[in-house]
Amino acid sequence: MTEKMQQNQIFNPEGNDLVEARTIIKGGTTGLFNLNATKYPWAKSLYQVMIGNFWVPEKVSGLKDDARMFHTDLTEEEQRAYKGILSFLIFLDSTQTVNLPHFSDYVTSPEVNLILSIQTYQEAIHSQSYATILESVVDSKERDEIYYFWRTDKVLLDRNKYIGQIYQDFLDDPSDAKFFRGVVANFLLESIYFYNGFAFFDTLTDHMKMLATGRMISYIRRDELTHITIFANLIREIRREFPNIYDEEVVKQMMDVAVKQEIEWSKHILGDRIPGINGRTTEEYTHWLANQRLGMLNIAPLYPEAV
């Protein structure tokens, strides 16, 4: 049985805010956000980048053109992929918006709590961006179909349940091992689960289709790059400060599951029906991307053929 995680106190008069006493988790600060004294310079740098990335979906122009293109320029297969991928993205960002504060409750570095709060806000902006796209591009009767695509699509339902259950397991039993699995799941969500979907929108814009949606997705991807960096750093700090909690085999096993799920979903929703995308390139890209993400954690490639 693993040890229970230690949740932050709102105010701890006996706490110690000295940098040398600070740890990424299981620390004992006062609860004060003393941001003039920081231990993790990567968090301070990310704060500046994330604040500089501010945007709102209402300012992205051209969605009326996308609405016309959706009905006149997209093939039936492209329309299905557009709706299915948006459904998955909506689920992922909805889950992150709700879940991130629960994990932040166990992070005992105020500078890291700060950027997790910004990430939560950005995930909410992403959710609003999908709502803006749907309001502008698709008919009202199609919106619920997109939000609840997983009700009729088993592949998507299985993906959603996998990631959602990892988060729920930690909420139900906040142990060290389940916290670590949750942190790894956050990293995989931000670094693997979005990217074939992003590639689909890139392919559309390469063919001069759905350009406003493509711009919106590019802003979302810019945010996600900082989110990947947050969780890569969290994992590295846990490895350094709490080697008894860090488990490289868990990282590799979860990465392999994420890659297999991403390939299965991408082949299911995209297949070989979208110009510029096919099952072979999807698999090669996902394996290459997984190796790159593992490299951020100083872990050897899982897929040496894709190096």
Image (cartoon, grey):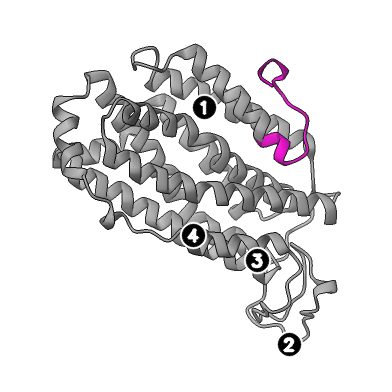
Residue 50 drawn at (x, y percent): 52, 60
Q: Is residue 67 above or below residue 52?
A: above
Dot 1 corresponds to which residue?
A: 262
Instruction: Pick the residue in front: 127 or 41.
Output: 41
Q: Amino acid at mark 4?
A: Thr
Residue position marked by numbered label 3 in the rendering? 44
What residue does disc 2 label?
A: 13
Tag 1 or tag 2, which sits nearer the N-term?
2
Residue 194, x across and y down, in percent: 48, 37
Question: Residue 55 location in percent, x, y?
Answer: 38, 59
Looking at the image, the residue that sits furthest to the bottom is 13
Q: Secondary structure at mark 3?
A: helix
Instruction: Using the rendered image of the protein, determine whether residue 191 is visible from the camera's viewpoint.
Output: yes
The image quadrant of residue 296 is top right
Left or right, residue 52 beside residue 203:
right
Closer-to-camera residue (139/304): 304
Is residue 62 highlighted in magenta? no
Q: Which one is in front in this view, the residue at disc 4 or the one at disc 3?
A: 3
The residue where tag 4 is placed is 120
Callout in the foreground (2, 3): 3
Residue 147 can be seen in this image: no
Residue 37 is marked as none
Residue sitting nearer the eye, 166 or 112 = 112
In the figure, residue 29 lies in which quadrant? bottom right
Q: Nearer the viewer, residue 132 or 15?
A: 132
Q: Which residues are magenta?
A: 293-307
Q: How many marks?
A: 4
* The stretch drawn in magenta includes residue 296: yes
